[in-house]
Amino acid sequence: MSAHENHLPPHVVIVGGGFAGLWATRALARDDVRITLIDRRNHHLFQPLLYQVATAGLSAPDIAAPLRHILRRQRNVEVRLGEVTGIDTGAHRVSLAGGGDLDYDYLLLASGATHAYFGNDNWAAHAPGLKTLDDALGIRRRLLLAFEHAEATDDPAERAAWLNFAVVGGGPTGVELAGTLAEIARHTLKNEFRHIDPAEAKVRLVEAGPRVLASFPESLSEKARRQLESLGVEVMTGRAVEDIDADGYTLGRSGPGSDSNRDRERVAARTVLWAAGVAASPLGALLDAPRDRAGRVQVEADLSVPGHPDVFVAGDLASVQQNGKPVPGVAPAAKQMGACVAKAIRARIAGQKAPAFRYRDMGNLATIGRMAAVVDLHGVKLSGLVAWWFWLWVHVLFLIGFRNRLVVLINWAWAYWSYQRHARIIFGRPDSVDASPPD
Amino acid sequence: MSAHENHLPPHVVIVGGGFAGLWATRALARDDVRITLIDRRNHHLFQPLLYQVATAGLSAPDIAAPLRHILRRQRNVEVRLGEVTGIDTGAHRVSLAGGGDLDYDYLLLASGATHAYFGNDNWAAHAPGLKTLDDALGIRRRLLLAFEHAEATDDPAERAAWLNFAVVGGGPTGVELAGTLAEIARHTLKNEFRHIDPAEAKVRLVEAGPRVLASFPESLSEKARRQLESLGVEVMTGRAVEDIDADGYTLGRSGPGSDSNRDRERVAARTVLWAAGVAASPLGALLDAPRDRAGRVQVEADLSVPGHPDVFVAGDLASVQQNGKPVPGVAPAAKQMGACVAKAIRARIAGQKAPAFRYRDMGNLATIGRMAAVVDLHGVKLSGLVAWWFWLWVHVLFLIGFRNRLVVLINWAWAYWSYQRHARIIFGRPDSVDASPPD
């Protein structure tokens, strides 16, 4: 039974409280609709700073805010903690794990993306990716325990393997992780160990393509490479990872004309982080809609699903082309899509034509490490310290909630002056400290 | 082979990086000794504020600091992440999990206490206690999920069970948890739910003895009870918990002359927290020494183990009497014992007589909730807002590390003005949101 028949306001079901879902929800605050926002987690996550939690610079609560709290004053929203398991576009119904269905008049699917191992799912156990707070805390635990293991062992080969770090993937996340990891080894942990010198840790960034930060102009990729190298990161481009297991990884050469047998290299490394592949949320497959190779749903100009004008997809789950180029999977694009879907729903309710989505490119930023970043603002290119300051202010300004902003700024100021990272806590009992790799 | 024969400085092994172990380590900073500090965790924990992490007011890293970082400049210390599994006082040797022995010249066992269920270990799964950061994060998860479950269910009985909270034990930890929980229900979560009113949550504090905060003067116990009640806590004294399971708990009447069958009460409650029993760390049993009922090691006047002048016990693991009364298991007592053991080791090395331990009672503080506390300073009794301010400053001043102090103060100032608690993050996937109780 649809809500229209009940003379209730239309029911908008929004799946996912990330940038796309949350911005759509807020944009509908003054509309006569009933919104149900469903998320598997109770918090909105400021994903651009997730690498800071993974590298112990920020606490998890610094970059997350409870969805209920953000939306407490928006009385047309009900927040529901739950997991969507089925979508019936014919019956206009969403099913939830543990039972319970929701009938919708309009549906927005904004469940984002996860990391992908290109068919090598067995790598997941040895090379964790970074998408959620739980991922970040798991990576933090691994990084910190690696230095503990290196300190505890007397075997030089094992010690070297614990001090060998690799980050796979030279996009923004890989560059951030590698740069920060080098800073931790060289500065943060200085003087803290008695049997190892953490500065001897090797941090390697492996990228299969010809350059890091491929979405930036070539000159900034080159600047980023030099900034990474000056932080102590070994940048390897044109090399593909062929295997990852508990003891290390195997590198081949990528690209045409390479003789992968001759160029194959086996590296003993106990800590490999995965920043290479992104796949759309599996919820996209629940829709009867065309999808691209990464599983993103190919939407109409107004972000609705072909043949289903009452179903929309936004954020990282949506595949949108503009001027022959894909709209990137970044926070500003997700927010703009969320706001556009709100307009489209408003137009549908009024019986009007929904506007087409236009991505306004606000520029491209990536941070590299201590006082190093690159910024591309429509052809204005910045790098180094100036870019880093720009990056910091943009990120702090966009953090949701005043308290978080202030605490994050203090943490950063402190980290800047002291090189210290305050969240270096290993949760759980490190039972495996002497022998086996951490969980 | 003892270190003395090698003409190396004597080797002091300290087990536990809590207040006792850390203060002993620091007190030996200028002595010609080699110290190995062993802890299962990589951080020193400011335990007096642990309840704030459990109730989402502070982040875990706010009240913890890496032991390596605290001690990085003290060059006569090696910090070792590991777990002690055996002590051979004859061979002067400590064994570690995963292999590896340490020979000592002097040993300090300061591994603290854990919570105890008085032989009802099956209660542990249903009524978690609060001793570590992992405990605190588990309790935080339970508290937050309880409100989510209550919001999600349509069954009035189930909803009531999810909104029924009980804290067992009316000591300082129980009082803090109950008071803060009432504040969360009445203020923090206000307006955030659509199907429940969190203020309808029932928070009950159950104490078997005749009054809460039994270590305080009776007048302050009475003040504490009234402050708890004005925060919305139901205080039940003279009632013992007879059983706890996944669905609730059974209350009996404690004390002589009670007819437990007649007074028995079964309460449906999905969230029970345990703050009733403390047992000494099991490492105490590895020593061949007399122990009290709670497993604490009964030490000599200089805190050494009878018959083993080179082995010391300090902190919550030590059973010390002074003027016929036990020295309480509080942070100031542990710090004083740690410092006293350092003096005793210095005296032993110099061939002198070690001083006897004297506990200097600095007074007794307990916080109750928003702007409510009780303070007993050698007969000067404070309660209410004045006591709360005193309590806050003392705790912030004693927090290790400037950065933590500043961030904690900001968090508190923010919580004070806004009633908000910033760390309301549920880690992990709340798979159990619709049916079973959270793990």
Image (cartoon, coloured by chain):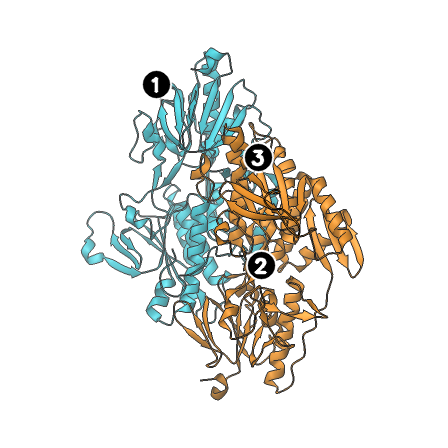
Chain colours: A cyan, B orange
Report the residue marked by disc 1. A90
**Residue A26 placement (x, y as % from top left):** 53, 27
SS for callout 3: helix
Amino acid type, mark 1 = Gly
Q: Which mark is residue B278?
A: 2
**Residue A228 placement (x, y as % from top left):** 42, 54
Report the residue marked by disc 3. A69
Left or right of A254? Residue B265 is right
Identify which residue, B347 or B360, lies in the foreground: B360
Q: CA distance from mark 2 to mark 3?
A: 36 Å
- Viewer can see residue A75: yes
Amino acid type, mark 3 = His
- Viewer can see residue B423: no
Q: Chain of mark 1?
A: A
SS for callout 1: loop
Crowdedness near tag 3: few (<14), some (14–19) or many (≥20) residues, C-alpha within 10 Å:
many
Q: Chain of mark 2?
A: B
Left or right of A271? Residue A404 is right
